[in-house]
Amino acid sequence: MPLDQTPPLNSLGFAKAPADTRVVVAMSGGVDSSVVAAMLAEEGYDVVGVTLQLYDHGAALAKKGACCAGIDIHDARRVAEDMGFPHYVLDYENIFQDAVIDEFADSYLGGATPVPCIRCNERVKFKDLLATARDLEADCMATGHYIQRKVGAEGAELHAAADASRDQSYFLFSTTAEQLDFLRFPLGHLPSKDDTRALAAKYGLSVAMKPDSQDICFVPNGDYAAVIRKLRPEAADPGEIVDTEGNVLAQHNGIIHYTIGQRRGLGIGGLADPLYVIKLDADRKEVVVGPKSMLATRNVPLKEINWLGDQPMMSRSEWPIAVKVRSTHAPRDAILRPLSDTTAEVELLNAEEGVSPGQACVFYDPDSSRIFGGGWIHKG
């Protein structure tokens, strides 16, 4: 090759041979991250696998159906051995407790409905683990998330996954532009999860047919209340279920058992029209209920905004965008009105039910797959 000719870019976007490109793969032990590691190893990259131990190893060994459990650490190690690259397990238990679990419990106590998986990505995987990858002199870090990183005119952009049913953009909105420069998501372009499992079979991975994780990793069997009760015993303090006028309708055994929009399990009978939880008042230990119409929200106050647009968010008074206010909802048309670099109000063009403090509001380009970041819904 002539001295003045730049080498072609490899599949990770670097102008050098794969063998000269070190990539740290965040391995949860599931099929997705295992396929990423195997794929890059087969392509000849200098792969280093890293798995995080996020909570008590003894309890984790017996727990299935969640990421980063004891059996998953074993599975990740086995994939690394089979594919012939080094693998490390890092004890992040204290970091995870402080950055994710404690806030999860406190948010529920405060009447919010938290999304711990976002905080884990933001504060653990894409912060501390990413810093570890840099310490290992990696050129980049790859994960098995279903999301796409594309290079645009102004640099790296975040885009929704090709398979809308697998898209994880809601949980990754807080990825910063600096982190995005360093991250790679090799599965985001795949048409379906079946393609991932086919690759796992091709590489002969033992996890090829391993079920997807379903629960929040530190919440066994989806029993949020049991976890919060253990961490914050006062969360189970009894209180009253009241209507919007303050009339007592029933008693409850802790606001941790309720979420905004809940209809069942209120213990209120004999009414012509059903009632729904419309507010949780942690200070008064009250669950406030009302008709379904009171769940409809158009104006959503946001804080801690992470903006990924090419122009500063404050450069306009209004941005026409689409937003998701729950992970399971499709993006809806909205107007973003910035108040500062990190706060804003979103106006939903059509009112939506179940908008809850503690959830995320993620911004999408209405005309493409691009994600412009997002923020956290608060009480305003």
Image (cartoon, grey):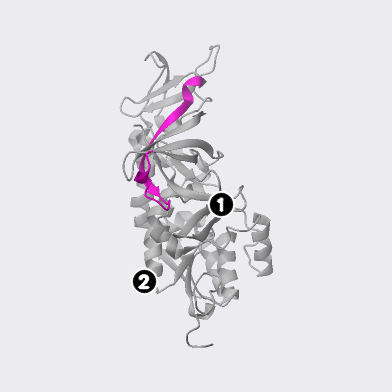
Would you say residue 168 is visible in this rendering? no
Quarter holding residue 37: bottom right
Tag shown at residue 325: none
When the figure is inspected, residue 379 is found, relative to residue 244, above or below; the finding is below
Q: Which residues are magenta?
A: 293-317
Q: Which residue is mark 2?
A: 135
| Residue 83 rendering spot, x and y as whole percentages | 58, 74
When the figure is inspected, residue 89 is found, relative to residue 56, above or below; the finding is below
SS of the residue under disc 1? loop
Q: In the image, what residue type sits under mark 1? A: Ser
Tag shown at residue 213: 1
| Residue 13 rendering spot, x and y as whole percentages | 51, 70
Of discs 2 and 1, which sits in the foreground?
A: 2
SS of the residue under disc 2? helix
Label located before the other in sequence (2 or 1): 2
| Residue 157 rendering spot, x and y as whole percentages | 48, 57
| Front in this rendered view, residue 61 or 35 | 35
Picture residue at 52% right of the left edge, 60% below the top? 150
Horizontal side, residue 327 vs residue 128: left or right: right
Q: Gap in Å between the C-alphas at discs 2 and 1?
A: 29 Å
Q: Residues within 10 Å of mark 1 (few under 14, many from 20)?
A: some
| Residue 161 rendering spot, x and y as whole percentages | 57, 53
Quarter holding residue 8: bottom right
Would you say residue 48 is visible in this rendering? yes
Quick one: quadrant of the N terminus?
A: bottom right
The magenta stretch spans residue 302: yes
Horizontal side, residue 204 vs residue 310: left or right: right
The magenta stretch spans residue 127: no
Q: In the image, what residue type sits under mark 2? A: Asp
Quick one: quadrant of the C terminus?
A: top left
